[in-house]
Image: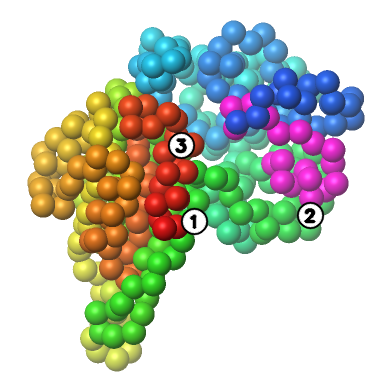
């Protein structure tokens, strides 16, 4: 949204939970400026005002246990979490607009008097990978249309957007030999922002080929059973040996190797994998990020993707998800 507004030559500020405190630019804002804020459930929890345009991208079970040792905030129930999040539209007036994922239409969205616009997926050309990013683009497009930005400007801004750091961020393609001769690449992606089981599942679904997954960390009381199933799942098309014959499907695990990052939740991930008979010899515990990348590199072959998508909070081995992602990138670039 910020990128599109900038492309339309609007004076716009970006802040909130994305990593920039609004206090940094509060005094610089002019009445005609636009402000894009990413607000967490904790920032929304006690609000009695909603923005002119509110966007809700998704809703998953999250923040139901205190993960950060320096910030013990958490919601006692999923209903409390839902209430906190939906303060973003609860206090809207008739002149306001709520842009909401179509998947949430089945929920009680009677909060607020603002107009409701539901988005699905956008097919605009984009550098972003993953089906979930088509939904993110669709949300941004709806907001841009409300503001009155021309379609051509929206299209160009979306096509030029490179994505955000630590969110399925492409790090490097490393040259590797092919089995039948020649060379291919191993691609490395940093998705350190994926601190829930659901977000790691979404990341895995973004890649068609074999993945080496770096996963694990601090406890957030997530259910890792769906993640374990996603790690084991995978049917991919391979070329038939006969010329001109249609593609055939061959079954193999979506994730060919799991590198565990040490933490209080990591043991539960391993247990869930072993419970569904994921190969024990395809799981290995790393003691540091350097060790994790070394293990991943040792088992990766041309055509593979090495993905850091931890599904857990970072505390313990790392200060936060940013440090975790930075250390991953440093090791990969070496």
- Counting residues from the start of the chain, the first of labels 3 and 1 encountered is 1
Image-based side of 122 in relation to 58, left or right: right
| Percent x, y of residue 225 | 23, 35
Q: Quadrant of the C terminus?
A: bottom left
Residue 60: say if magenta. Answer: no
> Residue at the front extreme?
334
- Tell me, for residue 215, which label it has, or none: none
Report the front residue among 55 and 25: 25
Q: Quadrant of the N terminus?
A: top right
10 Å crowding of disc 2: few (<14), some (14-19), many (20+):
some
Q: Nearer the viewer, mark 3 or mark 2?
A: 3
| Percent x, y of residue 182 | 34, 84
The residue wearing badge 2 is 153
The part of the image, by quadrant, that contains residue 265 is: top left
The residue wearing badge 3 is 323
SS category of the residue bearing label 1: strand
The residue wearing badge 1 is 170
10 Å crowding of disc 3: few (<14), some (14-19), many (20+):
some
Report the front residue among 133 and 189: 189
User: Disc 3 to disc 1, how far (Cα)?
Assistant: 17 Å
- Counting residues from the start of the chain, the first of labels 1 and 2 encountered is 2
User: Disc 1 to disc 2, how far (Cα)?
Assistant: 25 Å
10 Å crowding of disc 1: few (<14), some (14-19), many (20+):
some
SS category of the residue bearing label 2: helix
Whether residue 145 appears in this view of the structure is no
Residue at 16% x, 41% y is 273
SS category of the residue bearing label 3: helix
Look at the image and give the residue range highlighted in magenta: 1-18
Residue at 45% x, 50% y is 329
Q: Nearer the viewer, mark 3 or mark 1?
A: 3
């Amino acid at each position: 949204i910020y990128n599109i507004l900038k492309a339309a030559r609007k004076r716009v500020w970006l802040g909130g939970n994305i990593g920039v405190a609004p206090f940094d630019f509060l005094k610089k804002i002019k009445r005609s400026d636009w402000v894009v804020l990413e607000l967490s459930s904790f920032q929304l929890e006690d609000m009695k005002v909603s923005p002119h345009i509110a966007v809700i991208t998704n809703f998953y079970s999250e923040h139901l246990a205190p993960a950060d040792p320096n910030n013990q905030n958490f919601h006692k129930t999923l209903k409390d979490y839902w209430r906190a999040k939906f303060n973003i539209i609860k206090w809207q007036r008739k002149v306001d607009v709520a842009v909401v994922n179509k998947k949430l239409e089945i929920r009680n969205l009677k909060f607020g008097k603002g107009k409701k616009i539901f988005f699905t997926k956008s097919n605009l050309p984009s550098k972003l990978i993953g089906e979930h990013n088509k939904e993110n683009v669709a949300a941004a497009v709806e907001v841009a249309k409300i503001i009155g930005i021309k379609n051509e400007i929206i299209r160009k801004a979306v096509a030029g957007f490179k994505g955000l750091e630590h969110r399925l961020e492409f790090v490097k393609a490393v040259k590797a030999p092919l089995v039948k001769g020649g060379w291919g690449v191993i691609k490395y992606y940093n998705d350190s922002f994926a601190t829930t089981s659901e977000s790691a599942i979404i990341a895995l679904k973004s890649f068609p080929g074999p993945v080496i997954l770096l996963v694990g960390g601090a406890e957030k009381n997530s259910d890792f059973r769906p993640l374990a199933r996603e790690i084991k799942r995978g049917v991919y098309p391979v070329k038939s040996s006969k010329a001109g014959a249609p593609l055939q499907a061959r079954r193999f695990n979506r994730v060919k190797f799991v590198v565990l990052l040490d933490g209080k939740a990591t043991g539960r991930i391993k247990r869930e994998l072993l419970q569904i008979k994921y190969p024990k010899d395809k799981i290995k515990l790393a003691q540091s990020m350097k060790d994790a990348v070394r293990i991943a590199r040792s088992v990766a072959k041309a055509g593979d993707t090495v993905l850091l998508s931890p599904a857990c909070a970072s505390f313990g081995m790392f200060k936060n998800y940013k440090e975790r992602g930075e250390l991953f990138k440093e090791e990969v670039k070496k």
